[in-house]
Image: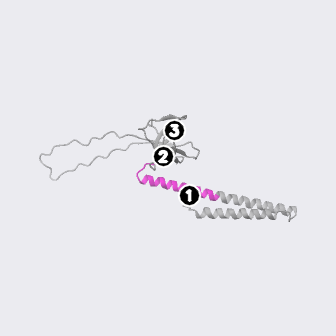
């Protein structure tokens, strides 16, 4: 984690270079002959380029730091029990309850049938794609008010109990984010896993 110290230092250095550029341009005015003026303006152009590079490096480091924070949040969600694998359909099998034996066994003990397992429902997963890194708006209902913005490549659970809704030229799906927020998204901007309706 880089933190904010290095981006702030780079931004301050960029501001200093931009100020130095301004001073160079002011000195390159009418006080010097043409050749000296051109030399000063060339030097000012180079410091302006340096200022731009420092600002871009600062922004890049902050974006990299933000990406690392998002990766850590995803890993934390995995540790807390959420699934972050790219496999869209995951079957969660019910655990069998352990059979308790009494010691010594009673002579009148009769065999009891084992636990009956009901079929495990498939979990339908989807991934946010095609937003050009702008994110996908999670809404309270189809076309409704905004709840959250879901990042590109975010993993969602499609709530299959709710049927898709056609509205305003979009097909809307009810989903749940890794953070537990529920709402509706346009199906055009998610890729459904295999086995989803």
Q: Quadrant of the N terminus?
A: bottom right
Helix, strand or loop at mark 2? strand
58 vs 37, left or right, is: left
Identify the main secondary structure in magenta: helix
For label 2, the residue is 155
The earlier-in-sequence mark between 1 and 2 is 1
Q: How many marks?
A: 3
Q: Position of residue 24 (x, y in %)?
A: 78, 64
Helix, strand or loop at mark 3? helix
Helix, strand or loop at mark 1? helix
The answer to the question of whether label 1 and label 3 lie on touching residues, with beta carbons closer than 8 A, is no
In the rendered image, the residue lying farthest to the left is 107
Q: Which residues are magenta?
A: 57-84
Q: Quadrant of the C terminus?
A: top left
The earlier-in-sequence mark between 1 and 3 is 1
102 vs 152, left or right, is: left
Q: Position of residue 17 (x, y in %)?
A: 71, 63
Give the mark toward the camera: 3 or 2. Answer: 3
Q: Please report the residue visible at 12 percent of the width from the left and 45 percent of the height from the top.
A: 108
For label 3, the residue is 187
The answer to the question of whether label 1 and label 2 lie on touching residues, with beta carbons closer than 8 A, is no
Disc 1 to disc 2, C-alpha distance: 21 Å
For label 1, the residue is 65
Q: Position of residue 93 (x, y in %)?
A: 35, 44
Using a 10 Å C-alpha cutoff, classify the residue at mark 1 as few (fewer than 14 neighbours), some (14 to 19) or many (20 or more): some
In the rendered image, the residue lying farthest to the right is 33
Residue 71 is one of the magenta-drawn residues: yes
Q: Position of residue 177 (x, y in %)?
A: 47, 47
Q: Please report the residue visible at 27 percent of the width from the left and 47 percent of the height from the top.
A: 97
Q: Nearer the viewer, residue 27 or 41?
A: 27
Give the mark toward the camera: 1 or 3. Answer: 3
Residue 12 is one of the magenta-drawn residues: no
């Amino acid at each position: 984690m880089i933190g904010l110290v290095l981006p702030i230092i780079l931004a301050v250095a960029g501001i200093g270079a931009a100020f130095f550029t301004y001073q160079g341009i002011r000195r390159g005015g009418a006080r010097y002959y043409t050749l000296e003026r051109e030399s000063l303006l060339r030097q000012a152009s180079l410091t302006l380029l340096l200022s731009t590079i420092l600002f871009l490096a600062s922004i890049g480091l902050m974006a990299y730091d933000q990406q690392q924070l998002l990766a850590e949040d995803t890993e934390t969600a995995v540790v807390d029990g959420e699934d972050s694998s790219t496999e869209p359909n995951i079957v969660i099998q019910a655990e069998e309850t352990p059979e308790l034996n009494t010691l010594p066994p009673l002579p009148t003990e009769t065999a009891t049938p084992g636990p009956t397992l009901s079929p495990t429902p498939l979990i339908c997963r989807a991934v946010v794609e095609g937003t050009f890194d702008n994110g996908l708006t999670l809404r309270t209902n189809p076309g409704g008010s905004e709840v959250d913005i879901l990042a590109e490549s975010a993993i969602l659970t499609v709530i299959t109990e709710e049927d898709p809704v056609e509205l305003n030229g979009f097909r809307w799906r009810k989903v749940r984010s890794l953070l537990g927020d529920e709402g509706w998204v346009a199906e055009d901007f998610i890729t459904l896993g295999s086995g989803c309706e």
